[in-house]
Image: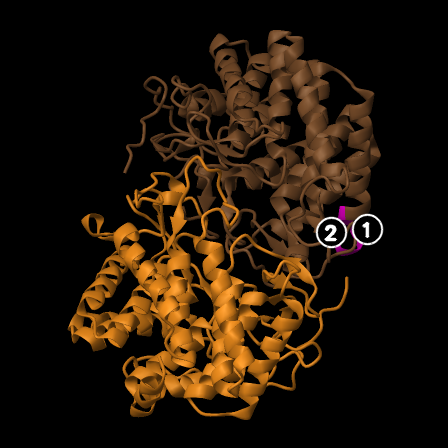
Chain colours: A orange, B brown
Amino acid sequence: MTAIASDGGSEPTLPRPTPPAGHAFDGDFYRRSLLENTLPFWFPRSVDALHGGFLHCVDRDGTVVDTDKSVWAQGRMSWMLLTLHNTLEPRPEWKQWGLSGLQFLQQHCFDADGRMFFHVTADGRPIRKRRYAYSECFASIAFAAAARATGREEHAQLANQLFEQFYDWNFTPGRMPPKFAATRPMIGLGPRMMTISTVQELRANLGPNAEHQKRMDRCLAEIEELFVKPGLRVVMENVAPNGDIVDHFDGRQLNPGHAIEAAWFILAEAEHRSDSRLTRLGCQMLDWMWERGWDEEYGGLFYFRDVSDRPVQEYWHDMKFWWPHDEAIIATLMAHQLTGDERYARWHQQVHDWAYAHFADPEHGEWFGYLHRDGRRSVTLKGNLWKSCFHHPRMEWMCWRRLTAGGAAAESRGA
Amino acid sequence: MTAIASDGGSEPTLPRPTPPAGHAFDGDFYRRSLLENTLPFWFPRSVDALHGGFLHCVDRDGTVVDTDKSVWAQGRMSWMLLTLHNTLEPRPEWKQWGLSGLQFLQQHCFDADGRMFFHVTADGRPIRKRRYAYSECFASIAFAAAARATGREEHAQLANQLFEQFYDWNFTPGRMPPKFAATRPMIGLGPRMMTISTVQELRANLGPNAEHQKRMDRCLAEIEELFVKPGLRVVMENVAPNGDIVDHFDGRQLNPGHAIEAAWFILAEAEHRSDSRLTRLGCQMLDWMWERGWDEEYGGLFYFRDVSDRPVQEYWHDMKFWWPHDEAIIATLMAHQLTGDERYARWHQQVHDWAYAHFADPEHGEWFGYLHRDGRRSVTLKGNLWKSCFHHPRMEWMCWRRLTAGGAAAESRGA
């Protein structure tokens, strides 16, 4: 058995204890939790001093349990660091570490055909490339944040180019190899919501772009027309190309956390455009998927549900994952701020309290990722090929921005 | 939303209540449970009178929740029906239903390149073909059982041909597209244990075949030399081609139920050959994976473990699935019968009692498939693209054969 390398950075600063829950509307709470608890869990120890990029597959105390690197995580962690540098305060180490992640992406994460890998070794040799193209998406927003941090045109060009590549791959018929045979094609919410979010990030950091805006508009329209079903009070995760519900396990399966994340992407756009119709759309999506996803018995958000309440095939359907809770904390706060509706304030408080009470690790900081339905911990991992330093710090950063004068000022500069 | 078709057969016979646990060594218990509880749950209602084959994605009361068909399930259910016809008693309906499944396979489940699909619609249009070739494997053993039931040479030829195709696909270097890039290749226990089991089935129904025997011998040797690690007291699920442990999430991940299934394939071979060395190998595999897999806190077998007790990445690692328990009931009984060791009798009693107490559905018969770690039910499904009428009835059939004079007589005729 080969030895697992220890972490690639210097000794971690011990994170301060997780602040108590009950601060759902306290901007300073989110800022402190981000700076004193979440970030010190990851940095500097996850920075790979040897090869660049980040070692993010870690146990509860930060011990590296797998030296492999997720290409998503390299882009996402670079984005987070550079975004904090751009909007919270300009710390040279955040910029340096973020750029090191981007250098790793450029040097190691592209295949000969120009598409990006999904999973590589610590020193950047390819392990897996996937059918879909989210690696490109996360790299795009990271390069956009880098362009703002460095002023380098090369970063802006790469951000645009990678978004084009993602969009082309997903929206040019026949380009992406289908998962299923042509017998029963389906289209997904994922590429549409990611287009919206990516265009928002590119706009915030690079300025408006008419072509990107058209693509976002197309995706907003498709989500409303094909995925949102007012009669059933639901947002579908996958539908037939004409919007029909595909009445099989995969077609019926709902992902409440994903749809709630899409809801806040749309609410952010409603706010940016002062568009009350988009506010209504985002709030409906949140309302319906909260209704579908919230577990009235144990609290927290289910991972999957079935549109007709039939049993779900995926084994982890009733587990509580960290990220849907981060997304719901953002979405409920935005909905409250945009509408003033007290119901959203109650939901925000409710998901904030449940999530900080169940996911937080009072001993080593950050959140655990995976709980059983009843809130017991399933596994001690803090990071793996899917979880890294992204959803949770993004939530704390967004809630800080939305709840404090300093954050609001940053808001008006950017997104 | 298109309507879900109701079941394809006539009204089901209501299964008699699940017999109480505590009959771990009672051959008649297994026979009655098989004939009065398990089979009546599936037949005749899962027989698709319209298109042939079986509708097996069903809820706890047998309601069809997805009309799609797993190609594995078509082969597995045909094999089970034809095997019962061949070895338990010759019932014309078992033969007829089994052959209807094979006709469906022949008419609808082969792609133009000769490889089989994985997942098709009720009327046989392709939904998904996969990288691996287990569809071929299950079809092969079903055609072998059909050859014995019908005496038709065509069935024997197909059985051999499909096994050849499976073997070629798995063991000819470069034939199967790899899941991972060439950076860090791994080989799996799966194709090796399936080769052993398939050759055993072909031998039982078609007679010995020297070429097949050589392939089985190769797989027995590779399991012993590459996957079984006496120093660590473990059977690996995947290793590097030279047998090294790959110290990453996927390489470290153990599947105790799968290794225990492999153990009884090897014990069956030990019995067939009167080979005490193989008995020792099979018993060691069972011993070590029981040690790794049995949950001392809640009982039952974990789905995945990590070879170095680090956290597992797959979300359902600590769930209790039905099939590892069926396999462990068989393996412990065989080990007890072959060695006389009382420890195996205790384990057999223990896993039998836990499984019948937790998986059985006293209301509608058969077993549930998916429990949480603590034995609570995760989902009401009795069948899906993975679970059908196979592991559980196979266990009851095997334990009946091994524990009764009638079964033992059938044993000596066949496998």
**Amino acid of disc 2:** Val
Instruction: Same chain for labels 2 and 1? Say yes or no.
Output: yes
Which quadrant of the rendered structure holds the C terminus of chain A? bottom left
Viewed as shown, does residue B269 lie left or right of B70? right
Which quadrant of the rendered structure holds the N terminus of chain A? bottom right
Inspect the magenta stretch and tell me whether residue B228 lies in it: yes
- Judging from the image, what secondary structure is the residue with disc 1 in? loop
Inspect the magenta stretch and tell me whether residue A345 lies in it: no
x 54%, y 84%: residue: A152
- Residue receiving disc 2: B239
- Residue receiving disc 1: B242
Viewed as shown, does residue B379 lie left or right of B171? left
User: Which subunit holds the residue at mark 2?
Assistant: B
**Amino acid of disc 1:** Asn
Q: Are marks 2 and 1 in contact (CB under 8 Å)?
A: yes
Region of the chain picked out in magenta, as a range: B227-236
The label shown at residue B352 is none
